[in-house]
Amino acid sequence: MPNFRREPVSLNISLTSSTFTIMAKTIYALLVGINRYQSLSPLYACVNDANNMKTWLEAAAARAGAKLSLLMLTNEQATRSAVTRSFANQLGLAGEGDVALFYFSGHGALEGAHSAFKQTETDNTIETLLCHDFYFVNGFADKELRYLIHKISGKKPHVVIITDTCHSGDSTRHSNNFQVRVKQAFPPPELRQGATYAQRKWNEFLFASEITEAQALAAAGNLNAVLPQGSHIHLAACKADELAVEAGESGLFTEALLQVLAQTAGNITYQNLFTRMNQLLENNPYTTQTPQIYVVESNTKTPVTAVPAVLYERFLGGLVAGEPVEANVTYNAQKGFWQIDKGTLHGLPSIGLDKVAVEVVNDKDKSVFARASLKAVFPDYAQIEFPASASVYSTDTYGAFVREVFTTPLLFATGGDEQGKQILQQYYANNTKSLKKANIAPTPRGNALNVYKITAKNNTFQLTYNNLPVAKEAEGYTTASANAIFGYLKHIARWQYVKNFKNTVAATQLQGSDVRLRLFYQTPAGAQAETEFNEQFTGKAAYAQIPPAGSLTQSPSGSIKISLTNLSATVSYYCALAYLGQLYDIVTDTFTGGVVQIAPKTTVYATVTMPNGKRAEDIPLVQDAYIEQYNYPESHFGLLLLCSLQPFSVDSFAQDALPAPKTGIRNEESAPPTDREPPQTPQKWQAVYYEVKIPNPYFTLQP
């Protein structure tokens, strides 16, 4: 397949997910808040933040009838040894179905990376949480947190890490009413290694007695070999190069977290929680920090999978019964209007807006307290308008239900072991409303082609289409595994919507297009051939190099070039080319910036970013390992060409690949989701979908 996919991103500290149950048995929590340090400038809100987290947890557990085992360490109590020991002892009590929650509010810093970590740390630093006695002892390094998470994950709890600290940077800002303070510590001259703290010795790491320096150096570049990861989910206050700040008596990240949790009584998915926190911080004038959400699944080779099931589960395992909020309502201060995070890509129509109702609900009991009307719909958001009588406030965020209709229906059938089928059927019964909103429905035609089939076998769920696997199996007959499989279906539905993306509004259609797409590929003879597209815009390509079948180190490969030519003598066009992969990924930056303006009688070429950071017109073409192993007749990918007379954006079309079916040889993993600006749909535009098929040279016809 063309190598448009982004490289996987390594994440040092993150949140963990594991086998998931709807109601937590016990919540084991370790909360750390540090205002006073032995050797660092003080902070003023961290202990208050930890206390506020404690208050929320106690109230939420009481409402849900869940058990809560909570340990809090503040100031002098929160030494490095006490924090790391309590992490292992307190959170290590959590078992399958329990929640293990670690919350830390305090200073953060960077230190030089040990040689064993430099191949995985591109900036040659590691991140540290600074405990009360820092300076006299080392910080709590991200690698040590990783080590401890793996230690407690053996019993399969649902692990959540929340860190309200800086990772880098320095700034102090003041308002008229209160001071804004940065949670970042910088090294004194005697401990300085550039702008970071000096690298520690190997024997100073928490895990040095179990993992020798020689072992780590021998495995350099393969961190999982010496420090395997445990499944978890992590909410972080900011990016690695941003500042986390506190203002008055609150850390702004923790304040946003608790505001959304209070509004929803915790009845919110991780994905929606993150979306609403991000909006609150974006509108906060005292910070530019961007919250982050990371997922690590221990059964994968990279920290983030394409569709992490935990993102669609409720916070802390679902403390409150009820259906999660389907959409988020926020006020866009820059544009001066209310909006919801649903658009044409989610099934909202671009015409007939008066027939669509937006019901704004009370987050706690889901009762409707306001209704809004759609004013304009864009690919990934919509402008809405409230009546003057609505009691809504621009500083708050809200949940909403919208009647969604996807244009591409997805049918699925179940089969296999009865135990697994019952889990799937129960999951569908419990989530029928949300799945119907995504137009995903069961069919009794279990053996029919063109139907996605979920098969329960050997304690795994496998999703197939036309009897071929489409993604990695979900292990275990559990709710989380069922959720992952249905998450795949939602992911595929969105991909199909983009594939079929057409401008059906006559008033905004371009009358014909002068832009011509051409695709060239290398042949085994070393020549360049051109793909011939038929009337349905389907064509074929081939690989230039074909190694022996079953090779463990090589795959069929070659390269392609894609050109767009503006045949008009007078009109310039703005064009974008979205790549749609066989693992249901969508890449939109085939041109620098996503959209290119093509002058009359001009040709431009799609490009891909190479390892050296430069962009190249020769796009690598490599057959995925699972194509050979599962005897696919061919690989395929799509190219969605969008043209307009005005500038536009397709960034919101992008999505990552599903995790590839297991091969035992090479598994490709996808990068984490990327934050993107909402696009504007152009006034005059059209879309054409091209499909390219590449025969599998090892395909054998089965009797």
Image (cartoon, helix red, strand yellow):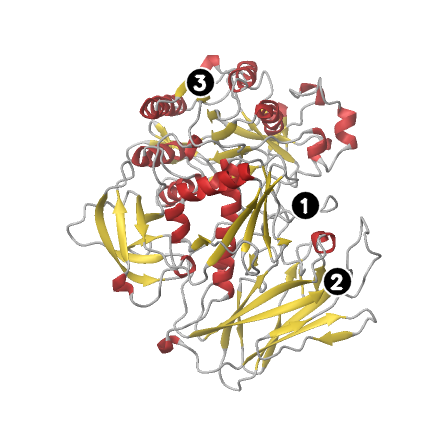
Q: Is residue 618 visible?
A: no
Closer mark to the observer between disc 2 and disc 3: 2
Q: Residue at x 41, y 66 (%)?
A: 681
Quarter location, residue 186: top right
Residue at the extreme bottom: 569
- In the displayed structure, 151 sits above or below 497; it is above
Nearer the observer, disc 2 or disc 1?
2
User: Which residue sits at x=54%, y=39%?
Assistant: 418
Contact, mark 2 vs mark 3 (Cβ under 8 Å): no
Mark before the other along the chain sequence, 1 or 3 = 3
Name which residue lies at 49% across and 38% down. 423
Q: Quadrant of the N terminus?
A: bottom right
Q: Is residue 617 left or right of residue 88?
A: right
Q: Nearer the viewer, residue 645 or 288?
A: 645
Say left or right for 380 vs 149: left
Residue pointed to by mark 2: 701
Distance of mark 2 from mark 1, alpha carbons? 22 Å
Residue 662, numbered label? 1
Query: In the rendered structure, which amino acid carries the disc numbered 1?
Result: Lys
Residue positioned 42% across, 53% down in the render: 438
* Spot occupied by residue 548 in the image (x, y as percentages of width and height): 84, 57
* Kind of residue at badge 3: Arg
Q: Secondary structure at mark 3?
A: loop
Q: Mark on residue 36?
A: 3
| Distance in Å between CA atoms under marks 1 and 3 | 50 Å
In this orientation, which residue lies closer to the viewer: 404 or 372? 404
